[in-house]
Image (cartoon, grey):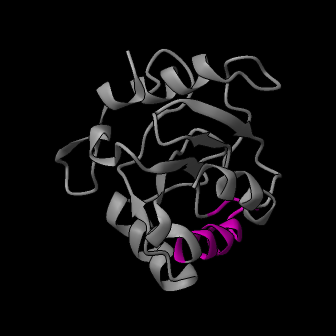
Amino acid sequence: MSIYDYKVKQVDGKMQSIDKYRGKVLLIVNTAPKCGFAPQYAGLEALYKNYHSKGLEILDFPSNQFANQAPGTDQEIVNFCHVNFDVTFETFSKIKVNGPDADPLYKYLKQQKGGLLGSQIKWNFTKFLVDRDGKVIKRFASNIEPDKIEADIKKLL
């Protein structure tokens, strides 16, 4: 399977194929608005504004699995991110990233690039960088600020 074989749930409840992003560079992030890393939304938005026209897409997947830091409905999370961080990249429906109920996309991402805890996601704001061919190139820990990823993104664009 490739990343383009997966479907994800949008905030409106409709399913969307990752194939929509074929040929784009993807930065896939599990987020949480109440997390101490939430200021990274601003850095992610800066990357999106600077490189979207060159082919970057940021896919935001809120997850409430870490200390319940993504409470509320999907729409409340979208509104929070828009109001507080002017986020314009796509936010999807809340998912699980670990455990038996982990979203299939995240199971795939973790298989492709393990981290400090092997295949598990350690915390919110873990980032996966995917090239234009759909290959998972790199995984970045939560504490890696978005601006530290910029050089890797530019290489792929």
43 inside magenta stretch: yes
Which quarter of the rendering shows the N terminus?
top left
Which quarter of the rendering shows the C terminus?
bottom right
User: Percent x, y for residue 16?
Assistant: 23, 43
Number of callouts in the render? 0
Q: Is the stretch drawn in magenta largely helix, strand or loop? A: helix
> In the image, 2: left or right of 69?
left
Which one is in front, 7 or 100?
A: 7
Residue at left offset 67%, top offset 59%:
154
Placement of 88 over or under 149, stated as above or below: below
Placement of 140 over or under 77, stated as above or below: above
Q: Quadrant of residue 90?
A: bottom left
The single residue placed furthest to the left in the displayed view is 14
Residue at left offset 40%, top offset 75%:
79
> In the image, 53: left or right of 136?
left
Placement of 120 over or under 56, stated as above or below: above
| Image: magenta residue range | 34-49
User: Percent x, y for residue 75?
Assistant: 33, 66
User: Percent x, y for residue 51?
Assistant: 55, 69
Which one is in front, 157 or 17?
A: 157
> In the image, 24: left or right of 12?
right
Residue at left offset 32%, top offset 39%:
18
